[in-house]
Image: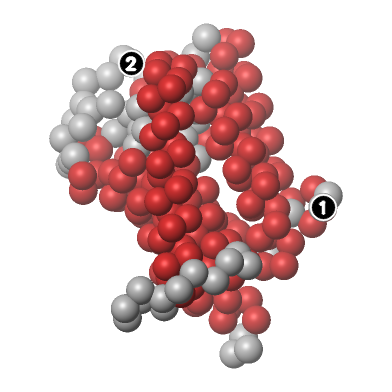
């Protein structure tokens, strides 16, 4: 699959990589994280920051999705984004992919805020957005057919298993990488995945009509 079949996914990944390189070279990485990362405690409050402009709070779920704290954090997220996202964007189109990424970023940030609204540490990374993409991919493209669990249909069981594996892998990498990987925003991943689950069928109908 070439980049022309998935221009949004490829472009987003390139933007994340280029921004990381640029901020690393200029030494502005930490300041960018402070000013453009999602900080739950900023909601309804004024935080004391160095002089300069901060990204408006309502836009930080998007701006934070372009920032990564380490090379390991960046590489892991981009591998998953390109592998899953390009397979999904090719048949579903840019509109569906954009809706998933934006919804994943916002719902993931909202879930992180719900978990700890007074947190003052910036949350960054594409994981919330990627989680939404992963959820839709799991629902419509996975070939495995696990047995239903009570009233839970098999396709939901499959998605939940994949969600557990995704979150578990992020936690393991967080523990293994320590400061190199950064703190894992577990609730952002959960929120992003739930957004993808909820949007999968409406976006399918939007893309293909009533079929």
Task: Determine the secondary structure under disc 1.
Answer: loop
Residue 112 appears at what percent x and percent y?
28, 44
Circle nearer the viewer, 1 or 2: 1
Q: Residues within 10 Å of mark 1 (few under 14, many from 20)?
A: few
* Vertical relation: 205 (above or below) 175: below
Q: From the viewer's perspective, is 106 left or right of 74?
A: left
Q: CA distance from mark 1 to mark 2?
A: 45 Å
Residue 36 appears at what percent x and percent y?
41, 31
Q: Residue, x 66% and y 60% (percent of image)?
A: 88
Residue 22 appears at what percent x and percent y?
62, 19
- The mark found on residue 51 in the picture is 2
Dividing the image into 4 quarters, which one contains the C terminus? bottom right
Q: Quadrant of residue 23?
A: top right
- The mark found on residue 1 in the picture is 1
Residue 151 appears at what percent x and percent y?
32, 81
Q: Residue, x 82% and y 52% (percent of image)?
A: 1
Task: Determine the secondary structure under disc 2.
Answer: loop
Q: From the viewer's perspective, is 133 left or right of 107?
A: right
Foreground pick, 97 / 180: 180
In this view, the residue farthest toward the bottom is 210
Color scheme of the displayed model = secondary structure
Q: Is residue 27 visible in the rendered structure shown here?
A: yes
Q: Residue, x 46% and y 39% (percent of image)?
A: 169
Q: Residue, x 58% and y 62% (percent of image)?
A: 137
Of mark 1 and mark 2, the one earlier in the sequence is 1
- The mark found on residue 171 in the picture is none
Q: Quadrant of residue 97?
A: bottom right
Q: From the viewer's perspective, is 81 left or right of 115?
A: right
């Amino acid at each position: 699959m070439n980049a022309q079949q998935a221009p949004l996914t490829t472009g987003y990944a390139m933007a994340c990589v280029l921004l990381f390189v640029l901020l690393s070279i200029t030494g502005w990485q930490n300041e960018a994280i402070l000013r453009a990362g999602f900080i739950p405690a900023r909601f309804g409050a004024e935080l004391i920051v160095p002089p300069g402009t901060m990204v408006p709070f309502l836009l930080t779920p998007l701006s934070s999705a372009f920032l990564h704290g380490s090379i390991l954090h960046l590489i892991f997220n981009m591998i998953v984004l390109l592998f899953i996202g390009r397979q999904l964007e090719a048949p579903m189109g840019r509109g569906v992919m954009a809706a998933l990424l934006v919804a994943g970023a916002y719902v993931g940030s909202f879930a992180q805020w719900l978990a700890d609204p007074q947190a003052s540490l910036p949350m960054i990374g594409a994981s919330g957005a990627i989680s939404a993409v992963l959820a839709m991919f799991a629902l419509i493209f996975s070939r495995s057919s696990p047995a239903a669990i009570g009233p839970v249909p098999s396709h939901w069981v499959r998605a939940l298993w994949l969600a557990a594996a995704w979150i578990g892998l992020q936690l393991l990498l967080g523990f293994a990488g320590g400061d190199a990987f950064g703190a894992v925003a577990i609730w952002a991943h959960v929120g992003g995945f739930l957004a993808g689950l909820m949007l999968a069928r409406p976006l399918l109908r939007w893309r293909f009509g009533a079929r």
